[in-house]
Image (tube, grey):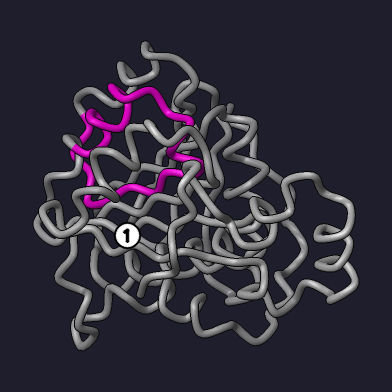
Amino acid sequence: MPKKQKRPARFDFKPFSKQQRRLIHWWRPAVRVSQNDFVIADGAIRSGKTIAMIIGFLTWSQEMFSGQSFILAGKTMGALKKNVVRPMLQILEAWGWPYEYIRSGTDARLEIGSNTYYLYGANTEASQDALQGLTAAGAYADEAALFPQNFIDQMIGRCSVPGTKIWMNCNPGNPHNYIKEEFLDKAEEKHVYHLHFMMDDNWTLPASVKERYKRTCRLAAYFTSGLSWACGWQRTG
């Protein structure tokens, strides 16, 4: 029988920064940027983008869809469970939303309300095979810049339900990365809403920790400002 995870601790919510609130609510019909098909949050580590994206993705998928399938993808299944699934379950516990976590290796998924969220690792080009045949209403890609190009293409192709949106986050990386060249550099053409995060966007991170990064890290700009792709994007949005 599929294994079920023990109930996690509830997430301890703190006030959100302006940039986090943008990521949480950008999809709402009354918001100007909601006509976009993609949101990409990039930038510094420890900048609060992952938690904000999880909250936004959950509320969007639950408020806008019923009885649909969604893709949750990470570089590896282990990374996905650690970086996304674990805090997602803590958030669900805090909200009191009922869910079922099925940990089967061949059909790992979260069932929340009437929607199903399938879990995928994207560490090789063959990983995209697992997506074939799925019809999805949306996707969440964690550290998408590390994914093989064919997985990203297949993931997007699987999202064919009207109203679908693709949510991706990433840290700075190679300036010739597929995400940058095909999505961020073509944001207007492809209807991408880009949000750049800095460490100061995470209000829960103690000032002493931020100072330690600035003081001790050789790549201080990378860690605190999220200067990315060897050219240092400016904040947008």
Tag 1: Cα neighbours inside 10 Å, few (<14), some, or many (≥20)?
A: many
Q: Quadrant of the C terminus?
A: bottom left
Q: Which residues are magenta?
A: 134-156
Is 235 displayed left or right of 201 in the figure? left
Q: Is residue 110 visible in the rendered structure shown here?
A: no
Residue plotted at (67% across, 43% down): 82
Residue plotted at (70% across, 79% down): 203
- Name the residue nearer the viewer: 116 or 213: 213
- The x, y position of residue 72, in whole percent, is 43, 43
Quarter residue 167 falls in: bottom left
The amino acid type found where label 1 is placed reads: Val
For residue 223, above or below residue 122:
below
Quarter residue 144 falls in: top left
Residue plotted at (66% across, 55% down): 221
Is 30 displayed left or right of 107 in the figure? left
- Provide the residue designation for mark 1: 39
Is 33 displayed left or right of 236 in the figure? left
- Name the residue nearer the viewer: 208 or 143: 208
- Name the residue nearer the viewer: 161 or 101: 161
For residue 76, above or below residue 173:
above
- The x, y position of residue 22, in whole percent, is 41, 78
For residue 107, above or below residue 181:
above
Magenta stretch holds residue 153: yes
Q: How many badges with numbers are in the image? A: 1
